[in-house]
Image: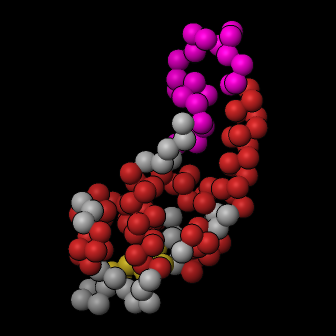
Amino acid sequence: MLTISKKSDYALIIIAQLARKKNYTPLSELIENTDLPRRFLARIAATLVSNKLLISREGRVGGYILSPTIESVSLYDFFHIFETNMDFLKCLKKSHPRCKYEKVCQHQHGIRSKLNDIVLKQLKSTKLSDLF
């Protein structure tokens, strides 16, 4: 089943927190507001900066702020930063060993060709900024 990782989940939390702010927000304030682990949050924020979703500034009045480019990022592009595979079934993953039920499975093709395509199309057409 499609699930998002903690990285994606926490990244959404960071973005939601920053969407409410107009100024740079220090990492310490994000941690205080969310109670998320400092080192993990710092790595996620750094990943968001390197993917141009956040802007960071050092110093006393530094912190993080949403990048203007966030308006054009789709949910698909956002999740693709942290997720390596977005298939609904484990057996659809390339890294998964061949399924022992492959000969009798009737839903693999239906899910892959229909449901997966529907969800991916929706993720590609929905902007990340629409969530906030």
Residue in view at x 40 percent, y 54 percent: 7
**How many numbered marks have been drawn onto this rendered protein structure?**
0
Q: Is residue 43 visible?
A: yes
Q: Is residue 117 magenta?
A: no
Q: Measured along the vertical axis of the image, is residue 95 above or below residue 21?
A: above
Residue in view at x 68 percent, y 49 percent: 120
Left or right of 6 on screen, residue 105: right
**Span of residues in magenta:** 84-108
Left or right of 13 on screen, residue 128: right
Query: 115 or 75: nearer the eye?
Result: 115
Q: Position of residue 106 (x, y in %)?
A: 72, 19
Viewport quadrant of the C terminus: bottom right
Q: Measured along the vertical axis of the image, is residue 1 above or below residue 23?
A: above
Left or right of 94 on screen, residue 120: right
How is the protein colored in the picture? secondary structure
Q: Is residue 94 visible?
A: no
Viewport quadrant of the N terminus: top right
Residue in view at x 60 percent, y 60 percent: 75
Picture quadrant of residue 37: bottom left
Q: Position of residue 104 (x, y in %)?
A: 68, 10
Q: Measured along the vertical axis of the image, is residue 102 above or below residue 85?
A: above
Instruction: Name the magenta segment's main secondary structure.
Output: loop
Q: Position of residue 124 (x, y in %)?
A: 69, 57
Residue in view at x 42 percent, y 86 percent: 21
Picture quadrant of residue 18: bottom left
Query: 61 or 129: nearer the eye?
Result: 129
Q: Position of residue 45 (x, y in %)?
A: 38, 66
Q: Is residue 92 magenta?
A: yes
